[in-house]
Image (tube, coloured by chain):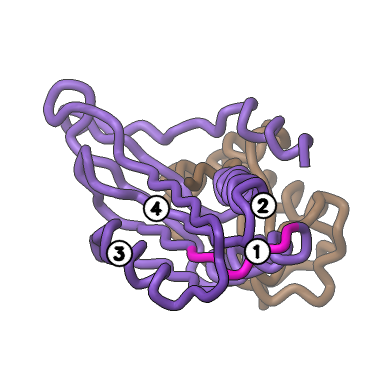
Amino acid sequence: MIDLIYFSWIRERIGKPSESIETRAATVIELIEELKKKDIRYSEVFSDLGSFRVAINQELANFDASIIEAKEIAFFPPMTGG
Amino acid sequence: MRISVQNEFFDFSKEVENFSSKLDNVGALVTFTGIVRGQKSKTLDYMLIEHYPGMTETQIKLIVEETFKRWRICDALVIHRYGKLEPGEPIMMVATAARHRKEAFEAAEYLMDYLKSRAPFWKKEILNGEGNWVDAASVDEAALSRW
């Protein structure tokens, strides 16, 4: 099981802050493709890869990164701290 | 080094006083404070700041550690708030102390640039009951390339 965590408008549009899923995806992009097939909310949220970022186990990652060791994957828009 | 991610209001002058009281053999102290911009009920009712508990603290620590590697600073302070903030309230502050001002200024700017685009915070502005997520500015991302 992997915990998926969503922030900001991604959380609002998916309609939940987190969920636990089973996946056979090996990389972030494979996971995204899998989620997009699940429901229209996901396909809308993840339609533009430039509009969001991903962190694996609380570390920023690329879309082609492996998720084999992932316990927690977070999706969020570019950060607006400061 | 002190890092605080908190919901509570902070008193800027007390924080600076506390930070400076622990310094020794320092010639420059630079501070920056970010404030919620806007006029109540006119341009902004309040701001909501969301963050990623756990990752936020880790990311800020990495940014501060990198600052120490790049500049000869004696100490650094980062406070960043989350939750509901009213116009005029402080959002965050950084303070850097060094022997000379150049190091202190540059370290503070570096901290600010990285906190803006690499610390997992997201701002939402609420006016007349409607919320809008603040978009990351491309100039903020571009600012990182100068370092």
Q: What is the quadrant of residue B76 in the picture?
A: bottom right
Mark before the other along the chain sequence, 3 or 2: 3
Residue at image mark 3: B7
Mark before the other along the chain sequence, 4 or 3: 3
Q: Is residue B50 above or below residue B125?
A: below
Residue at image mark 4: B92
Of all chains, the one bearing label 2 is: B
> Marks 1 and 4: CB-CB under 8 Å?
no
Residue B107 x %, y %: 64, 52
Distance (Cα) linking label 3 and label 2: 30 Å
Chain B, chosen colour in render: purple
Tell me, yes or no, whether the highlighted magenta stretch contains residue B118.
Answer: no
Residue at image mark 1: B73
Distance (Cα) linking label 4 and label 3: 11 Å
Q: Residue at x 55, y 59 (%)?
A: B27
Label at residue B103: 2
> Marks 3 and 2: CB-CB under 8 Å?
no
Residue B66 x %, y %: 73, 62
Mark before the other along the chain sequence, 3 or 1: 3
Tell me which amino acid carries mark 3. Asn
Seen from the viewer's position, the closer of residues B18 and A32 is B18
Establish whether labels 4 and 3 are both on one chain. yes
Tell me which amino acid carries mark 1. Ile
Residue B77 x %, y %: 49, 65
Distance (Cα) linking label 2 and label 4: 21 Å
Distance (Cα) linking label 1 and label 2: 7 Å
Chain A, chosen colour in render: brown
